[in-house]
Amino acid sequence: MRHLFATLLFCFSSYASFAVSGASIQTITLDQKTASITVLNTSDRDITGYTVALTATFEGGRERRSEYTTDYGPLTGKVLRAHQTATEPYQWQEAPLTVDGKVIVVIYNNGTAEADTKETLNQIVSVRAAIAKALRFSADTLNAALSYPKPSEYARVRLQAIVAEKDKSFNQSYLQGTLSVVEDASKNTQHERDILQANAARFDKEATAFQAYANVRRLP
């Protein structure tokens, strides 16, 4: 966030032995290469995103530590409600013997968060901010394009230029989505400007939502 919006996966060599207070792992059910992890929201607030750190033990005593993040997004209407559970699958390339885990990041719907470290929390916030930046750039580009005789051509060139820079502070998937909108508009010359204007308004609204969504304060 699965959300998302999407579930984001991160792998690390180690993680701190710390669990946040607002959520915990209720159960881990292992079925060959896949574990089903059920997270319980133990707080009185809705959760918009969380990160789970896992330790899997394999034959020979080998261990692998990894993390996954579920982030629901500001446009889906989905959250992990207070005192409710969410179950996510996590898969390895080989079957582990045991799996243990902890919730290490929780972001609440009021913009506050619990996290074992600032860096762990920033992994989620940076994704949110990159989506907001891509949407804001998309809205500004389409609005600017409306002043040109060939609006889709202007928007395409500007978007392709920013994509070519491979700037990680922009979410590339969202920029590619805007390029698809521009391509569709260019094929409908009768309503080209209407399509661009409508999508500029949509991107503007979504950018504002994601900008607020990325404004997160870590609790002490």
Image (cartoon, rainbow, N blue to C red):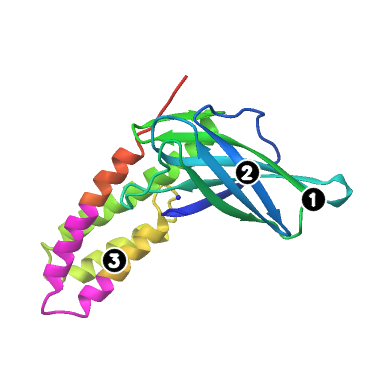
Q: Earlier in the sequence, mark 2 or mark 1?
A: 2
Q: Secondary structure at mark 1?
A: loop
Q: Secondary structure at mark 2?
A: strand
Residue at (53% x, 27% y) in the render: 21
Number of numbered callouts drawn: 3
Residue at (36% x, 39% y) in the render: 214
Residue 6 in the image, given as x and y percentages of width and height: 46, 55
Q: Is residue 204 left or right of residue 21?
A: left
Q: Earlier in the sequence, mark 3 or mark 2?
A: 2
Quote the CA–CA distance across marks 3 and 2.
50 Å
Write the start and end of the magenta stretch as one range. Answer: 182-204
- Label 2 Cα neighbours within 10 Å, binned few <14 / some 14-19 / many ≥20: some
Residue at (17% x, 56% y) in the render: 201
Residue at (44% x, 56% y) in the render: 166
* 31 or 146: nearer the viewer: 31
* 70 or 25: nearer the viewer: 25
Residue 125 circle label: none
- Label 3 Cα neighbours within 10 Å, binned few <14 / some 14-19 / many ≥20: few
Residue 212 in the image, given as x and y percentages of width and height: 29, 38
Q: Secondary structure at mark 3?
A: helix
Q: Which residue is mark 1?
A: 97
Residue 27 circle label: 2
Q: Is residue 178 left or right of residue 190?
A: right
* 146 or 100: nearer the viewer: 100
Q: Which residue is mark 3?
A: 157
Quadrant hosting residue 91:
bottom right
Residue 65 in the image, given as x and y percentages of width and height: 70, 43
* 42 or 72: nearer the viewer: 42
